C-alpha cells in the first residue's frame, strides 16, 4: 500500500483534510511551487528596499510622537535619535537599494546571459531613471559617499504648532556634500551646484522608491509575469482561495500507520502561501503604476 498524501488545513492543533492528492497532481504542484518560490526569492530583493523604507518612515513618525509628548522638548537628548538614527536608517536604505540593483543585474546575467536582451533592458531602465530623476542619481552616488565618508550628513528642522502637531524636515546641505566628497560625477555635481536650498530627504527617498519599484515591475512584466500568473492561478485553484492564510499543507501518512497501535509518524509540507500573497502585492502595485501611466 502506498503512503497517503492529502491536502489539508491546519488551524490551531487541528488538521482537516481537503482531499487526497495523487502523484501526478502532486508532481504538477511541485512544478508550479518552484516557479512561485523562484519569484519570491527575486521579490525579496525589492522587499528589503521596501522594508528599509518603512523603517525609515516609521522612525520619523515615532520621533514626532516622542517629541510631541516630551516634557523637556528643548533637551538635547530628545533630538539625538532624530539625527543619528535617521542617518543610520538612511544608510540601511541605501545599502538595500545597492543590493537590489547589483543582485538584479547579476541574476539577469546568470539566467539569460551577459549579452541578453533581458540584461540590456535592465540597463535601459536604470539609465532612464538616472537621466530623468535627480533622486535616483543622487542617492546612487550617495551610496558611494557613505563608503568613504560614513553616515550621510543629515540635518533637521522641527516645527511645533500647539494644537496641530509637529512637522520634521530632514535635509542635507548641497554645500556640505560638495565640500567633503569630490567623486559625485559630472551629473550629480552639477545638480548639487544648482540647488538653491537644502535637499529634502523624505521627498527624495519617496521618489527613489518609486524608481526602484518601476524597474522591478517593468522586469516582472517583461520576464516573469506570464509564467508566475499561471502558477499562481494553479496553486490558488488547488487550495480554493487567492487570499490564502498560512494554514495549507500536504499531510503525508505512511502506509503502515493504520496497523500501528502506538504513536504515528507523519510529514507536513507547507504550501508557500506567503509567496502567493507577494504575487498579490506585486500585481496590485503593477495595476496602480499602469493606471497612473508610470509603466
Image: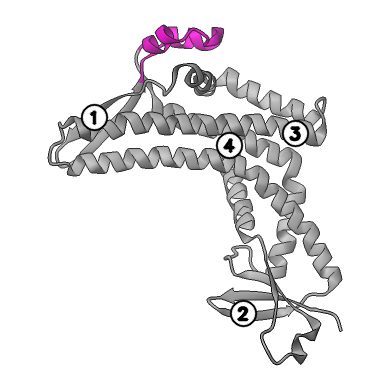
Towards the viewer: 11 or 148: 148
Q: What SS does tag 1 mark? A: strand
Q: Earlier in the sequence, mark 1 or mark 3?
A: 3
The residue that mark 2 highlights is 15
Distance from Cα at disc 3 to Cα at disc 2: 41 Å
Q: In the rendered image of this protein, does residue 15 appear above or below residue 157?
A: below
Q: Is residue 13 rendered to the left or right of residue 206?
A: right
**Mark 3 and 4 residues: CB-CB less than 8 Å, in contact?**
no
Marks 3, 2: nearer the viewer: 2
The residue that mark 1 highlights is 158
Distance from Cα at disc 1 to Cα at disc 3: 44 Å
Badge 2: residue crowd in 10 Å (few <14, some 14–19, many ≥20): some
Q: Main secondary structure of the magenta part?
A: helix
Q: Is residue 252 rendered to the left or right of residue 51?
A: right
Residue 285 circle label: none
Distance from Cα at disc 1 to Cα at disc 4: 30 Å
Marks 3, 4: nearer the viewer: 3
- Image x and y of residue 35, in percent: 75, 52
The residue that mark 3 highlights is 108
Q: Tell me the magenta residue range.
A: 172-196
Q: Earlier in the sequence, mark 1 or mark 4?
A: 1
Residue 215 covered by magenta stretch: no
Distance from Cα at disc 4 to Cα at disc 2: 39 Å
Quarter containing the N terminus: bottom right
Amino acid at each position: 500500500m502506498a503512503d497517503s498524501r492529502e491536502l489539508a488545513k491546519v488551524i490551531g492543533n487541528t488538521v482537516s483534510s481537503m482531499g487526497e492528492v495523487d502523484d501526478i497532481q502532486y508532481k504538477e504542484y511541485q512544478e508550479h511551487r518552484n516557479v512561485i518560490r523562484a519569484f519570491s526569492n527575486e521579490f525579496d530583493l525589492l522587499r528589503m528596499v521596501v522594508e528599509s523604507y518603512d523603517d525609515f518612515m516609521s522612525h520619523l513618525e515615532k520621533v514626532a510622537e516622542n517629541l510631541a509628548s516630551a516634557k523637556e522638548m528643548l533637551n538635547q537628548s530628545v533630538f539625538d535619535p532624530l539625527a543619528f538614527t535617521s542617518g543610520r536608517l538612511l544608510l540601511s536604505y541605501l545599502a538595500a537599494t545597492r543590493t537590489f540593483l547589483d543582485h538584479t543585474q547579476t541574476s539577469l546575467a546568470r539566467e539569460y546571459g551577459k549579452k541578453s536582451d533581458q540584461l540590456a533592458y535592465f540597463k535601459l531602465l536604470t539609465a532612464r531613471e538616472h537621466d530623468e530623476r535627480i533622486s535616483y542619481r543622487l542617492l546612487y552616488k550617495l551610496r558611494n559617499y557613505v563608503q568613504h565618508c560614513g553616515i550621510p550628513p543629515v540635518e533637521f528642522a522641527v516645527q511645533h504648532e500647539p494644537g496641530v502637531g509637529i512637522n520634521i524636515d530632514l535635509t542635507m546641505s548641497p554645500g556640505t556634500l560638495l565640500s567633503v566628497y569630490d567623486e559625485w560625477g559630472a551629473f550629480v555635481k552639477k545638480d548639487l551646484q544648482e540647488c538653491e536650498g537644502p535637499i529634502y530627504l523624505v521627498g527624495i527617498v519617496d521618489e527613489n522608491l518609486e524608481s526602484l519599484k518601476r524597474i522591478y515591475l517593468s522586469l516582472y512584466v517583461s520576464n516573469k509575469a506570464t509564467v508566475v500568473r499561471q502558477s499562481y492561478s494553479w496553486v490558488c485553484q488547488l487550495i480554493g482561495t487567492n487570499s490564502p492564510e498560512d494554514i495549507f499543507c500536504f499531510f503525508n501518512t505512511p502506509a503502515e500507520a493504520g496497523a500501528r497501535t502506538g504513536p504515528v509518524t507523519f510529514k507536513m509540507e507547507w504550501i508557500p502561501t506567503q509567496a502567493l500573497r507577494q504575487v498579490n502585492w506585486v500585481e496590485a502595485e503593477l495595476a496602480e503604476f499602469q493606471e497612473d501611466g508610470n509603466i
